[in-house]
Amino acid sequence: MIYRILLLLQLPLCVMGQTSLEQIPSLIENKQFELAEKQVAEVLKTNPENLKAVELLGDAYSHQKKWDAAIEEYNKLVEAAPKNANYHYKYGGALGMKALENKMKSIGFIGDVKDAFLTAAELDPNHMGARWALVELYMQLPGILGGSKTKALKFANELEALSKVDGYLAKGYIYEYDDEPELAEKHYKMAVKTGGSLLCYDKLTQFYLGQNQPEKALANLYEAYKKHQKESLLKQIKAIEDKLQ
């Protein structure tokens, strides 16, 4: 009897914790990061091994750029579920952001960042985020620290096998970064032709602006507006036209 009473007393706490947890993604989506942090922390007080709660707390920290705290939470996830690709991906991402904030100490993080992304990619052959991260990482790292255009292209090819648009965008990024504008333009155009999303058009626009080709950027923006009819595109068009006058 006493055991049953204890179970009944605990039930409202469990239900309340579950209800609170279900609200967290919405809070994060609405950029109420501090409130999300507080609510999920309350859930973890009564259920510290709830991995979903740990992940959401890490996400709340990440959105606030509290990288040390986010790393701690994501590391708990990696240790508790080492076969979960997304946990490794988030852990690597938080480590990478911390490294960017403190470049003097970044060398000490590079190996762990790379290992986390590689593990995520290996565990999940369809994990596009990990492959994008590896493309950028291998291009941005100097050769002495493991940077490699060849490896970046390898993961760009894997992206292309999953999504032609992402593969084209990744290769556009690689060739742009490596100062091969003709190949970069070719792949960004392929992404626009294949996907035609606002993102694809924007990548091509930003490429043209970076190459000091505002006329091509304008032509691309007009094409994008014809397809998507977005007010933001008209603002971009006007800004470029004003500079050309």
Image (cartoon, rainbow, N blue to C red):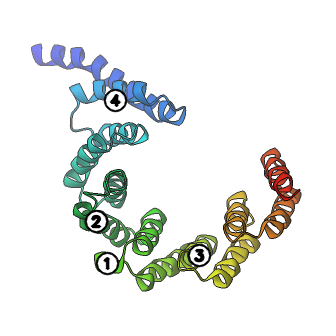
Determine which quarter of the picture holds residue 221: bottom right
* Total tally of numbered discs in the picture: 4
Q: Which of marks 4 and 3 is nearer the N terminus?
A: 4
Q: Name the residue under label 4.
A: 40
For badge 2, the amino acid type reads Ile
SS type, badge 3: helix
Q: In this view, does 203 lie to the left or right of 142?
A: right
Q: Earlier in the sequence, mark 4 or mark 1?
A: 4
For badge 1, the amino acid type reads Gly
Residue extending furthest left?
Answer: 2
Where is 147 relative to 61, above or below? below
Q: Residues within 10 Å of mark 1 (few under 14, many from 20)?
A: some
For badge 4, the amino acid type reads Val
Q: How far apart are marks 4 and 3 (CA)?
A: 42 Å
SS type, badge 2: helix
Q: Nearer the viewer, mark 4 or mark 1?
A: 1
Rendered-image quadrant of the C terminus: bottom right
Q: Mark 1 points at which residue?
A: 146
Is there CB contact under 8 Å for labels 2 and 1? yes
Q: In this view, does 128 lie to the left or right of 183?
A: left
Rendered-image quadrant of the N terminus: top left
Q: Which of marks 2 and 1 is nearer the N terminus?
A: 2
Determine which quarter of the picture holds residue 10: top left
SS type, badge 4: helix
Q: Position of residue 37 (x, y in %)?
A: 36, 29
Q: Earlier in the sequence, mark 4 or mark 2?
A: 4
Q: Name the residue under label 3.
A: 176
Q: Which of marks 2 and 3 is nearer the N terminus?
A: 2
